[in-house]
Amino acid sequence: MGEVKLSVDGLHVTFHRGGDTVHAVRGVSFAVAPGESFGIVGESGSGKSTVLRAICGLAPTTRGQIALDGAPLGSPRGAAFFRSVQMVFQDPYASLHPRHPIDRVLSEPLAIHRFDRREERIEQALRDVGLGHEFRFRYPHQLSGGQRQRVAVARALILEPSVLLLDEPTSALDASIQAEVLNLLDRLRAERGLTYVMVSHDLAVVAHMCDRLIVMQHGLAVEQLTSQALAAHRAETEYTRKLLSASEGYTPAEAP
Amino acid sequence: MSDLLTVEDLRVTFPTRQGPSEVVRGVSFTLGRERLGIVGESGSGKSQTGRAILGLTPPPGLAVARRLEFDGIDLRRATARTWRALRGTRMTMVMQDPKFSLNPVMTIGRQLLEALKFGADETRREAKDRALAMLEAVQIRDPERVFRAYPHELSGGMGQRAMIAMMLVTEPDLLIADEPTSALDVTVQVEVLRILDRLVRERGMGLIFISHDLRLVSSFCDRVLVMYAGHVVEELRASELSKAQHPYTRGLMNCLPKIEGGIRPLPVLERDAAWAR
């Protein structure tokens, strides 16, 4: 691969709670090219979200290196990092402040990063995610789940980042709303040449959105493959095959 | 096939400041000893339908029906005593989230034994063995530990399986499962469904499977009711879902991304006000 936008090399993440040590991520490496959409698939507890959080600096990097545009990231991450890397979280009900109107949700990152033309940018961000002007002064509880997730996307994009980290962006949404949000993300990536790292438990969503993906289990990347290989069911490992057959729907008995 | 459950013109209303809001608007179906799926998006009234059958419409909501019969018993006129004899023993319900449906200050074991209400011919020891066997049947690897554990000591998947064990240990005739596997990983989900499937086949249990996941329901159930805005817009055999007529059902099917790749952008569901009538 030529150019690399974001690289994760031998990442380990350990959490200490009381006397327990939880080794959540145990040596994960991947590299994402500019403009690429990269997927991480796994079941709960596989460490897939922890990888995203480690990239953002929300989880400690115990060992290994994360680099953006070839430069290793410092800890804590600087303001410049967040200008280029933003995250969209899973639960649109929990990730927006219930007592801040959308206007405040969107103007806060602009104020922190000292952007100019705030009025214009807020209006533009709302238009970009398909919400009208009338949503600007509403509170999160006045919006549906899909509309909230659009606000979360708008908040991430208002800083004009080049990398978007998506942590299960549609798993809290209905199927028809999921399609709308996925289409929105697809369109924005095409228009702005964004780089995506998308985490999901849903193989179909990742196969639809991403070019390449890794499958994680117990903190390890068990397999890396392209979505074409996934579509053709050319999985190397037993675990990926198991995930694939489970995503097809219910089968009465374990396939021999 | 004898009908286990008959529902005719079921309506559930909630009073709001803007006047009564009807969330289930005339649902009718019959259930034999089979797997019936109810599919719909959030707010379609599918969960309220399930709750109303068990008389669990949360106040101040009100459920009325022209007919609501379970195995010849008229549930509309059921007294508290009748409900007590039915609920938890002959008809049970698995809720979506184990975090809110398990008692946080009781061990799993005590909650299981409470569900069993073992009689005089069964000792505590025997009841416990039965409970442990049930925990094993729902693929819990270490039933002894789970039996002693409190709900907060279990993961979401374990909690959900423990709850399913609790609902099945009394060997009910009717199980209403409200999104029983949405909180579970796909591989665990298949295991849980196999348990439910076995119970329907071996013991002739009737199952109402409420879910938003059309793909899952179509591969698991015998028959599917598709709900939209409180109505059943379409009823069909699960195997014939691809031949669905109603634009809503077709839209729901088409907007799912496919592993095999497909159309980009995904087709978006266009809602028609006429569907809600």
Image: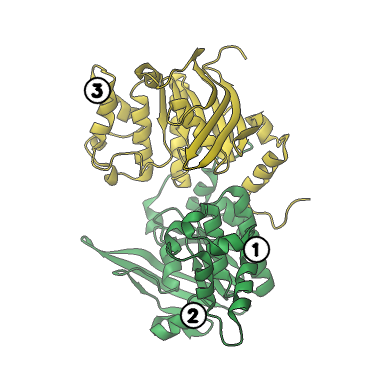
Chain colours: A yellow, B green
A186 or B191, which lies in front? B191
- Residue A128 place in picture, x, y as percent: 35, 27
Q: Nearer the viewer, mark 3 or mark 1?
A: 1
B141 left or right of B153 in image: right
Task: Indicate the amino acid at tag 1.
Answer: Glu
Disc 1 designates what residue?
B136
Between B93 and B29, the residue placed more toward the observer is: B93
Residue B183 in the image: above or below residue B119: above
Of A192 and A171, which appears nearest the observer? A171
Q: Residue at x 43, y 39 (%)?
A: A90
Q: Position of residue B169 (x, y in %)?
A: 58, 72
Identify the residue at horizontal 40%, vertical 19% (top origin): A81
Position in image of residue B117 (x %, y %): 52, 79
- Mark 2 neighbour class, 10 Å CA radius: few under 14, some 14 to 19, many 20 or more: many
Whole-angstrom CA distance, mark 3 to mark 2, is 60 Å
Report the residue marked by disc 3: A111
Assess disc 3: are there few (<14), some (14-19) or many (≥20) residues with their C-alpha within 10 Å of its C-alpha: few
Residue at x 41% of width, y 74% of height: B55
Q: Chain of mark 3?
A: A
Residue B243 visible in image: no
Q: Identify the secondary structure beneath mark 2.
A: helix
Q: Chain of mark 1?
A: B
User: Which chain is indicated by disc 2?
Assistant: B
Say which element carries label 3: helix
Q: Amino acid at mark 2?
A: Leu
Q: Nearer the viewer, mark 2 or mark 1?
A: 1
The Cα atoms of the two marked residues, 2 and 1, are separated by: 26 Å
**Which residue in the structure is indicated by mark 2?**
B86
Residue extending farthest to the right is A256
